[in-house]
Amino acid sequence: MSTKTDVGTLTDQQIAVLEFERQPFGAPRSLGQAPAVLNSRERALYGSGKPAAIRQLFGFSEIRYGQILAELLELPAAEVYDAQLVRRLRRIRDARRGSRRS
């Protein structure tokens, strides 16, 4: 994926946000395959949805999380860390912006 020097300008929190965005929210629940025993992180991801997971894992609101993510998507270091993820998130963001204008 990348080396430590490639992502040297990303903070631990920024890396955690990118890793969090990789998670498939709702997949185990919708497929009926949620693990029988969940740790606190899994409960946050699968139990109450993404907003609750954001509050539990990062300690801030979904709105603040969105602001942090938006800033992160503009950093070249984020694309170095995980180009495929960052480009996908940018496409989603741009599509939402386009639909709001229509």
Image: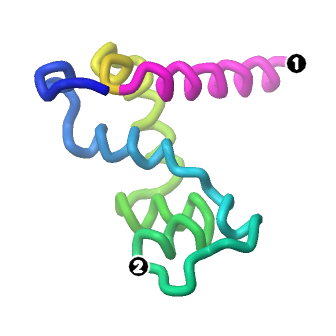
- Is the residue 66 above or below the residue 48 in the image? above
Name the residue nearer the viewer: 32 or 11: 32
| Residue identifier under label 2 | 39
Q: Tell whether 46 sits left or right of 96.
A: left
Residue stretch rendered in magenta on the structure: 82-102
Tell me the element at label 2: loop
Dominant secondary-structure state across the stretch colored magenta: helix
Name the residue nearer the viewer: 21 or 55: 21
Q: Tell whether 88 sits left or right of 56.
A: right
- Estimate how packed mark 2 is, as few (under 14), some (14 to 19) or many (20 or more) residues with alpha carbons within 10 Å: few
Residue at the bottom extreme?
Answer: 37
- Is the residue 22 above or below the residue 39 in the image? above
Eye-nearest disc, 2 or 1: 2
The part of the image, by quadrant, that contains residue 35 is bottom right
Which amino acid, mark 1?
Ser
The part of the image, by quadrant, that contains residue 89 is top right
Q: At which x and y percent is residue 92?
A: 66, 27
Q: At which x and y percent is residue 55?
A: 45, 64
Residue at the top extreme?
Answer: 76
Tell me the element at label 1: loop
Q: Is residue 37 magenta?
A: no
Q: At which x and y percent is residue 63?
A: 52, 47
| Residue identifier under label 1 | 102
Which amino acid, mark 2?
Asn
- Is the residue 41 above or below the residue 82 in the image? below
Residue at figure coordinates x 30%, y 38% from the top left = 14
Residue at figure coordinates x 50%, y 41% from the top left = 66
Q: Tell whether 83 sits left or right of 81.
A: right
The part of the image, by quadrant, that contains residue 96 is top right
Q: Are marks 2 and 1 in contact (CB under 8 Å)?
A: no
Q: If the image is split into quadrants, where does the N terminus sit?
A: top left
Q: Is residue 88 magenta?
A: yes
